[in-house]
Image (cartoon, rainbow, N blue to C red):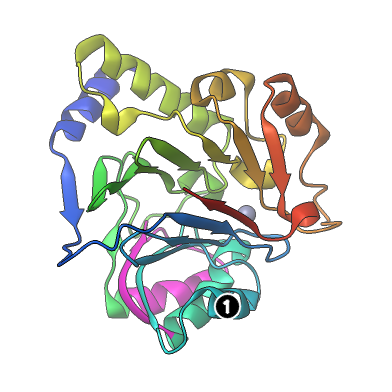
Amino acid sequence: MHKKRLVILLLFFLLLNIFSWNFLFSLEKELEVVFFDVGQGDAIFIKTPQGHNILIDGGPGNIVLEKIGREMPFLDESIDLVVLTHPHYDHVSGLIDILKNYKIEDVLCTGVLSESNIGKKWNRIIEERGYRVALAGQRILANDIHIDILHPTRKLRGEKIGDLNEASIIIRLSHKGKNFLFMGDAYKKQERELLSLERECKKRHDDCSFFEISADVLKVGHHGSRTSTTSDFLSVVSPEFAVIQAGKDNRYGHPHDETIETLEREMVKIMRTDKDGDIRFVY
Ligand SMILES: [Zn+2]
């Protein structure tokens, strides 16, 4: 990355954009993260110890409605935060039904333009209801949980991007020393950007917690495709578990053998929705 651009980026990171949820009391429960088996696509449901609900992506079709119905308490129809990593069908489809059927407090997405009908539909809905434009450096605080946005490093609202996977929102969630890194469909190029930002920050600053990418659980980028997940990246993230969200016998051949081999070489425990169904972590 060009030095000047990096410095501008770092300066930007100093103007951190923090928003938080307030709580009257804490029930001291556990954090639950469920990677739904929605076929070929991503949908991740997070229940915070304080009872807040977060949904990252909605998968293809609307199977997410059935999945989330089982996770939410009866009569609870509100979701605190819905995140769309990028407006491809296998991530956005279910969210359109979620927005129709649930009361959504906040939506976080890039607002990037999409050529597909479903992407255009999503954009129409969110431009009307309002949303937060995702940008690296944002931190969402919720008592002892924080969610950092690591990518994209510039605002993409209203922009056309050749390959929407490159516009994926990347998120790191931290709770009591346990960390999850959600890569969306980001590629090796975005992984290199994250590595470079963390490295450059550490040269100049003591506190680089906003750039940290180490994680106990890595949601592998792009369904385990060979386009993502380098050894260099894995050795810094150093996850215990890698979760791959892919559909059984999907037409892309995800996850690719190369990715599985890289994960095995790095001694990461692999979990796959196509083989294991819904995957749940409780911390
Ligand atoms: Zn995808």
Q: In the structure shown, which secondary structural element does the residue marked by tag 1 occupy?
A: helix
Q: Which residue is drawn at 86% across and 56% down?
A: 249
Residue 201 location, x and y as percent? Answer: 27, 19
Q: In which quarter of the image is residue 92?
A: bottom right
Which amino acid lies under the numbered mark 1 shown in the image of this protein?
A: Arg
Residue 163, visible in the rendered structure: no
- Residue 124 magenta: yes
Q: Which residue is drawn at 34% across and 66% down?
A: 52
Q: Which of 213 and 72 is in front in this view?
A: 72
Residue 21 location, x and y as percent? Answer: 20, 61
- Label 1: few (<14), some or many (≥20) within 10 Å? few
Q: Which residue is drawn at 25% across and 18% down?
A: 4
Residue 49, visible in the rendered structure: yes
Q: Is residue 50 above or below residue 118?
A: above
- Looking at the rendered structure, the number of numbered marks drawn on it comes to 1
- Residue 235 magenta: no
Q: Is residue 251 above or below residue 186?
A: below
Q: Residue furthest front?
A: 28
Residues in magenta, as a range? 102-126
Q: Is mark 1 within 8 Å of ligand 1?
A: no
Q: In which quarter of the image is ligand 1?
A: bottom right
Q: In this view, does 131 lie to the left or right of 88?
A: left
Q: In which quarter of the image is residue 269?
A: top right
